[in-house]
Image (cartoon, helix red, strand yellow):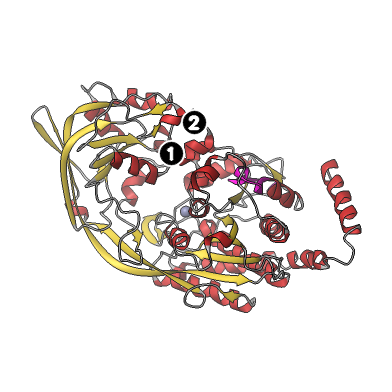
Amino acid sequence: MTPKHAFKTLLFLALSACGGDQEPPVADKGSALDAVTAENIEAHVAYLADDALEGRMAGEPGYDEAAQYVADRFAELGLEPGGEDGWFQQVPLISYRLDEEAAVLIAHRDGKDTELLYKEHFVMRGDQVREENKVRAEVVYVGFGVHAPELGYSDYDGIDVAGKVVALFSNAPATFPHNERAYYSSREVKTEQAIAMGAVGTIILVSKRMEEYYPWERMKLEAGTMPGMAWVTLTGEAANYYPELRGGAIINVDVARELFAGTPISFDEARAATEASTPASTPLGFEVTLGRKTKHEVATSPNVIGVVRGTDPELADEYVVYSAHLDHNGIGAPVDGDAIYNGAYDNAMGSSLLIETARVFAASPPRRSVMLIAVTAEERGLLGSDYFAHYPTVPTASMVANVNLDMPLFLYPVADIIAFGAEHSSLAATVEAAIGEEGFELTPDPMPEETIFIRSDQYSFVRKGVPATFLVPGFRSLDPDVDGQAVVEDHRKNHYHRPSDDLARPVDWDSAVRFARANARIGYAIGNDDARPTWNEGDFFGETFAR
Ligand SMILES: [Zn+2]
């Protein structure tokens, strides 16, 4: 026990001593936490990541079976249904696929037309709504495509992109503070910016990081194997659809080098400029034609929602919301003869912990209510959580916090935890205390360049002003012989979003149990506190999105 923990215990004893007849739930909470067992978690993961569920693609039968499994567990645990239709909130979806034969990218330069080859030179996605589009326009290089005058940075200053195709890198300048970098990295913010400037199409360029983590061979292999999706509003429109953009593609590094040759900037200079966070935007002096045809289908896929009713009549109408995405990538490009993307860690594991979190709270509810949501179509663009955030089954103002579970890796005995997003609100202190009770230390985000805070479902809640956090195990192992960071990097490179993220992956189940308990402790702390969590004074996300 560290001195800090000893101090906490003393403080706790002192507080309980003067608590009088209040709260036997402290003892109940302890035994409720004991309801989480490795056997329970393992059984859920084994079911959800089984080949029989075919990778739980939103809109497919395997996902529906997973959803029924979660609903059945919620029912067994005595939760209240929290959906629109019992346990379920059906999310209407448009599922769309590019007609790969009709994918066109032609470069027009120096009076010559060069037809590039799909997969060999470029990849593209379908259009969410239109069956056919085609656009021919000049290409303008715009760095990251970020316009942030308040940070003294703009890729668009002095550059005219009206009616043009913008060529840009993903991510945002490394010199930005982490929060701003995450915000400006989001595809939505960039797309809206490009449209506001009048762009009609996009070409995404491959950064060094993208090359390393997502080599072109893999891009090629996966292109066209999974459908794109959009959720549909109550008035029948595709959400987050940008009709102004009439084409888009990602081009590989060799093609980019050739296309940039002889323009005011070489591709390698452009890439170096973004790495140095220096705007170097310039018209490239050639045109492209982007063309495609898309096939569309309608589908629905449910979020699964259960509620544990709080014990305090004054606070039971407020909710601590836990979320975990239940979908994964279905059946796709085979790797070593295996085409089922089981998503054992991503996110059968998080979904299993969600069920166990429900078990804890059902055994001993806090004062506030707890809502548990298994969301659909995260892998297709945070669609289920975004739908819920737009059409919540309880008022948005009644959601006091979101705790998200996504791909917690227990590849070794875990010593520390990273709590993405906690630093933006009063949740930081809550989280640190809760995880300390399970022997975890809090580690600051070691890879802000990955902008993970905006890349899972908690961001759908943040964008509605709800303070949120998303915990993952850190890189430190309790076993001094294990280099945790190397093990996690190996998983990210070789198993993440691949068929091999399956039941063969090692799991330190004891860490999984402690992690589940730590997450539940956060819910108790939030659920029992007189005050609800607050955004920090002047916090970027709080200021940008809070009510
Ligand atoms: Zn994923």
Number of other residues with Cα within 10 Å of mark 1, as a class: few under 14, some 14 to 19, many 20 or more: many
Residue placed at 53% from the left, 43% from the top?
543
> Please, what secondary structure does the residue beneath circle 1 have?
helix
Q: What residue does disc 2 label?
A: 176
197 and 451: which one is in front?
197
> Please, what secondary structure does the residue beneath circle 2 have?
loop
Q: What residue does disc 1 label?
A: 184
- Asked whether residue 273 is in view, the answer is yes
Residue placed at 71% from the left, 58% from the top?
521
Q: Image check: 83 left or right of 140?
A: right
Inspect the image, locate mark 2, and give the three-letter code of the amino acid beneath it.
Answer: Phe
Q: Distance between the residues labelled 2 and 1?
A: 9 Å
Residue placed at 34% from the left, 44% from the top?
192
Mark 2 or mark 1: whose residue is earlier in sequence: 2
Q: Where is residue 41 in the image (x, y as percent from the top left)?
A: 63, 65
Q: Is residue 276 above or below residue 359?
A: above
Q: Position of residue 508 (x, y in %)?
A: 66, 55
Mark 1 close to ligand 1, CB under 8 Å? no
The magenta-colored residue range is: 414-428
Q: Where is residue 439 in the image (x, y as percent from the top left)?
A: 76, 49
Q: Position of residue 207 (x, y in %)?
A: 38, 34
